[in-house]
Image (cartoon, rainbow, N blue to C red):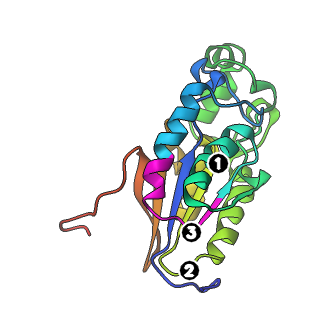
């Protein structure tokens, strides 16, 4: 086992939950505890079959039902216990929560525009993206400390939280986190550990990674 000074070759799979009714309606969920749709559960089952092939060593998940139910599909196939942590919840967005995309643009247009420009914004009076990273990334780092060399950790969370966590783990400045595009329902991103730290190997993937062959491997 490796501790904080760790061996190399570990992987982190950051997996977004399956579809909810609010996703379909383009309604901002944040920390609202919305369940998966039947489609979302089917997405989770399909993705779990693929991710089980990576032979994960541990699963940590947000305690919100949409993430917990997604994680449960992988747990059922791998016989791993899921550790739930509220630090992996989606961004709290105050008055934005429950509004559709169009309603947010209509009612909070200036705030929305500032956020899209990369300015630090408390959307709806909620959390800054840096605050989300500050609560979520340590959850991932604590789980990593328990992994064996070459081990794989699956983190089941939410689109915004995953993006900020990737940004933090890669050492990107917060204003560049938006460069990481969003994740589709039940898609995932994979970070691999190398000699100079974490590298983004896959982003918004729905298939298993292929080896990189060529001049940049």
Q: Residue at x 71, y 63 (%)?
A: 139
Q: Are marks 3 and 1 in contact (CB under 8 Å)?
A: no
Residue 179 vertical position relative to residue 78 in the rendered view, above or below:
above
**Which mark is drawn over residue 148?**
2
Q: Nearer the viewer, residue 90 or 103?
A: 90
State the SS at label 1: helix
Rendered location of residue 107, percent (x, y): 72, 15
Identify the mark nearer the N-term, 3 or 1: 3
Q: Which residue is mark 1?
A: 72
Q: Which residues are magenta?
A: 48-59
Residue 3 vertical position relative to residue 188 in the rendered view, above or below:
below
Rendered location of residue 38, percent (x, y): 59, 26
Q: Nearer the viewer, residue 197 or 33?
A: 33
Rendered location of residue 184, percent (x, y): 49, 36
Quarter occupied by residue 118:
top right
Q: Report how far apart the C-alphas of labels 3 and 1 lie in the structure.
A: 15 Å
Numbered disc in front, either 1 or 2: 1
């Amino acid at each position: 086992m490796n501790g904080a000074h760790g061996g190399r070759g570990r992987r982190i799979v950051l997996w977004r939950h399956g579809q909810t009714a609010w996703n379909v309606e383009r309604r901002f969920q944040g920390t609202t505890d919305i369940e998966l749709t039947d489609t979302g559960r089917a997405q989770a089952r399909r993705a779990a079959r693929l991710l089980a092939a990576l032979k994960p060593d541990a699963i940590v998940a947000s305690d919100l039902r949409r993430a917990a139910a997604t994680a449960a599909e992988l747990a059922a196939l791998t016989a791993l216990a899921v550790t739930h942590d509220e630090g992996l919840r989606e961004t709290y967005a105050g008055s934005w929560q429950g509004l559709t995309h169009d309603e947010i643009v209509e009612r909070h247009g200036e705030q929305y525009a500032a956020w899209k420009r990369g300015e630090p914004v408390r959307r709806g009076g909620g959390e800054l993206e840096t605050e989300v990273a500050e609560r979520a990334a340590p959850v991932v780092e604590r789980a990593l400390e328990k992994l064996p060399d070459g081990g794989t950790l699956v983190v089941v969370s939410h689109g915004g939280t995953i993006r900020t966590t990737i940004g933090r783990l890669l050492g990107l400045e917060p204003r560049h986190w938006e460069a990481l595009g969003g994740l589709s329902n039940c898609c995932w991103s994979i970070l691999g550990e190398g000699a100079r730290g974490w590298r983004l190997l896959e982003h918004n993937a729905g298939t298993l990674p292929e080896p990189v062959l060529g001049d940049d491997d």
